[in-house]
């Protein structure tokens, strides 16, 4: 047959004959509907319209569950009318013949050929180009399911176990819409600290109950193991992701008047929250959110979510010479403080004046000089006196000749110590060592703002001095402050990567060592670290690996996403998440899930 003959045949079919074909298709429609009804009747099935669920489990490519997830083959055929509503990550239920149910999620979606025909042909393509859309029933729409757990009832209570059964071919697959079943399937506690609402693909999971959402909470009772606040939390998110908004909402839950933790002496004590604040935002938690509607507040009340300004809020303001603090954006009480130079000796913080420059050879020389200074001057010795002390040429000569400190090492230490910003120590304000009752108050929020300080070094020194004071008293068997020792404490640190990074300096190693020990002892000492960062990859690994609960908002950096070590299917969503969307990975609390935080901050936030 000639090429022209082939083209003519195609034109007769798809060109002038196309209208006739369309007319024929229209004429055939009633007949097709009749055939469909007859087919339902032939199989003893009710006509379309009485269907339940999304589709049925298919055995066309095998049906298998395995201890090796890669060997599992579990697929469901999704019927035509349900296909547009199905999303990756959606939660489904597949019943077994008895009272048990398989809880699973959709891991993949695909169209497959309904019949063994080739749709990659000229004729098929040209036909499709002359009609709008396509016939859904010409294709199979298959959902690959990932088993999560088997849920069952025992003693009137829903429970879960690992997937150990394969569902029957043709079993009904329906969307999970019962809150109790969803929480059981995902191992989400019924009570605890509220983080957000369960979502899939940026849309809240809907239930048939009121409210029609599934709240996600973190375990907060010793009856369920240790409260996870004392096993530490990380909030990671890029600029504009809503991490401060989300952090305020979480911290406000720990300040709820009804939240207490048992101490070893039998007392029930409300936790204190101390928050280091680089942007002067957290003291606003003293105030109500003026934009919150009464309707939204009632919704929070119905869901048991704490909201409203926290009256017991103090801004503990670091004083640096020549620098003033505004604080006009909040109404919290302000208390000024200074760091006495005596903390270097009394609280064993020689690294505080070492800075980032001293190496392992120079650090012992600094210790020698500090010991001699405090031996001569006592705890009343000041930083300025220490500088004058170092200027004594007789001291340098004596130490050099005795072989204790080489003169070059002495000069290096002197340069580093003088590199500390002027006006940090011993200013005209109350010493932080005398403010333990203001710093830590059961049920109180203390915010340490650092936005007004002149340099990053000054900010670092204040944050490390105060946080180390807290950690040392928490871990010590002979604490300087019983108030700090005997109060449950949530220690919040924004821009944590600036203070807890790994570096090859004495100061960095000492700080990381201190906070690693704090993280390890947190459960025992009722100390919870609440770290907030946009660069989680920069937080020292010994500290990072102690964090149990990771709240990950939008992150655009590949290294940052990789560092938080969340499951691949959720990590892939992170760069595309809108403000307020988050992934929560807390192995001791639940399966990894996607959440949407509250659309409004429960306290004042912003201007």
Image (cartoon, rainbow, N blue to C red):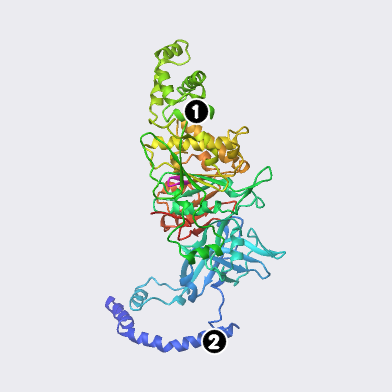
Q: Is residue 130 visible?
A: yes
Residue 409, relative to residue 75: is it above or below?
A: above
Q: Secondary structure at mark 1?
A: helix
Total numbered circles: 2
Residue under numbered circle 2: 38
* Figure quadrant of the N terminus: bottom left
Percent across and percent down for residue 445 are 51, 47
Q: Residues within 10 Å of mark 1 (few under 14, many from 20)?
A: some
Percent across and percent down for residue 128 are 36, 76
**Mark-to-mark CA distance, 1 and 2:** 89 Å
Magenta stretch: give its range. Answer: 532-536
Asked where in the image residue 117 lies, by quadrant, the reply is bottom left
**Residue at 55% across, 51% down:** 254
Percent across and percent down for residue 277 are 44, 44
Q: Nearer the viewer, residue 260 or 113?
A: 260
Say whether residue 534 is magenta: yes
Residue 164, relative to residue 81: is it above or below?
A: above
Left or right: 336 as drawn, with respect to 2: right
**Labelled disc at residue 344:** 1
**Residue at 42% across, 58% down:** 578
Q: Kindly give the residue lying farthest to the left in the view shown.
A: 4
Q: Residues within 10 Å of mark 2 (few under 14, many from 20)?
A: some
**Labelled disc at residue 28:** none
Q: Is residue 57 visible?
A: no
User: Answer yes or no: do the residues labelled 1 and 2 have beta carbons within 8 Å?
Assistant: no
Q: Earlier in the sequence, mark 1 or mark 2?
A: 2
Q: Nearer the viewer, residue 50 or 227?
A: 227
Left or right: 359 as drawn, with respect to 267: left
Residue 397, relative to residue 491: is it above or below?
A: above
* Figure quadrant of the C terminus: bottom left
Residue 391, relative to residue 570: is it above or below?
A: above
């Amino acid at each position: 047959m000639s090429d022209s003959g082939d083209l003519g045949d195609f034109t007769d079919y798809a060109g002038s004959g196309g209208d006739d074909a369309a007319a024929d298709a229209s004429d055939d429609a009633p007949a097709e509907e009749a055939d469909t009804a007859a087919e339902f009747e032939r199989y003893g099935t009710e006509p379309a319209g009485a269907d339940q669920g999304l589709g049925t489990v298919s055995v066309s490519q095998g049906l298998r569950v395995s201890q090796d997830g890669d060997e599992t083959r579990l697929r469901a055929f999704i019927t035509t009318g349900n296909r547009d509503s199905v999303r990756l990550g959606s939660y489904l239920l597949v019943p077994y013949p008895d009272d048990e149910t398989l809880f699973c999620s959709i891991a993949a979606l695909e169209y497959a050929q309904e019949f063994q025909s080739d749709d990659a042909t000229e004729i098929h393509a040209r036909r499709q180009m002359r009609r709008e859309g396509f016939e859904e029933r010409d294709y199979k729409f298959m959902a690959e399911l990932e088993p999560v757990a088997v849920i069952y009832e025992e003693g009137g209570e829903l429970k879960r176990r690992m997937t150990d059964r394969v569902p029957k071919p043709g079993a009904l697959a329906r969307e999970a819409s019962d809150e109790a079943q969803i929480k059981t399937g995902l191992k989400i506690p019924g009570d605890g600290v509220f983080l957000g609402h369960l979502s899939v693909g940026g849309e809240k999971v809907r239930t048939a109950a009121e409210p029609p959402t599934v709240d996600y909470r973190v375990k907060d009772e010793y009856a369920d193991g240790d409260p996870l606040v004392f096993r530490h939390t990380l909030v990671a998110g890029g600029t504009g992701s809503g991490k401060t908004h989300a952090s305020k909402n979480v911290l406000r839950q720990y300040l709820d008047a009804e939240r207490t933790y048992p101490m070893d002496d039998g007392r029930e004590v409300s936790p204190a929250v101390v928050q280091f604040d680089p942007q002067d935002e957290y003291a606003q938690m003293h105030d109500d959110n003026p934009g919150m509607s009464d309707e939204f507040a009632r919704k929070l009340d119905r869901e048991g979510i704490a909201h409203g300004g926290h009256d017991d809020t103090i801004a503990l303001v670091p004083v640096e010479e020549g620098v003033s603090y505004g604080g006009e954006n909040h109404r919290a009480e302000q208390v000024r403080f200074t760091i006495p130079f005596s903390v270097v000796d009394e609280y064993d913080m020689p690294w505080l004046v070492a800075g980032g420059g001293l190496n392992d050879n120079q650090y012992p020389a600094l210790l020698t000089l500090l010991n001699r200074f405090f031996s001569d001057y006592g705890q009343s010795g000041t930083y300025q006196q220490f500088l004058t002390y170092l200027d004594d040429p007789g001291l340098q000569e004596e130490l050099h000749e005795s072989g204790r400190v080489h003169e070059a090492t002495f000069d290096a230490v002197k340069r580093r110590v003088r590199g500390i910003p002027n006006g940090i120590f011993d200013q005209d304000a109350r010493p932080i060592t005398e403010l333990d009752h203001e710093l830590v108050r059961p049920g109180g929020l203390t915010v340490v703002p650092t936005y007004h300080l002149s340099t990053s070094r000054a900010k670092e020194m204040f944050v490390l001095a105060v946080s180390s004071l807290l950690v040392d008293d928490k871990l010590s068997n002979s604490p300087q402050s019983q108030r700090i020792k005997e109060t449950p404490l949530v220690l919040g640190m924004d821009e944590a990567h600036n203070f807890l990074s790994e570096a090859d300096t004495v100061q960095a190693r000492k700080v990381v060592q201190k906070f690693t020990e704090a993280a390890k002892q947190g459960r025992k000492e009722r100390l919870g670290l609440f770290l907030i960062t946009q660069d989680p990859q920069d937080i020292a690994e010994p500290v990072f690996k102690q964090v149990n609960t990771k709240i990950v908002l939008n992150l655009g950096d590949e290294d940052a996403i990789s560092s938080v070590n969340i499951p691949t299917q959720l990590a892939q969503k992170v760069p595309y998440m809108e403000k307020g969307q988050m992934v929560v990975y807390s192995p001791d609390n639940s399966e990894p899930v996607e959440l949407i935080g509250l659309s409004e901050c429960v306290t004042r936030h912003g201007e």
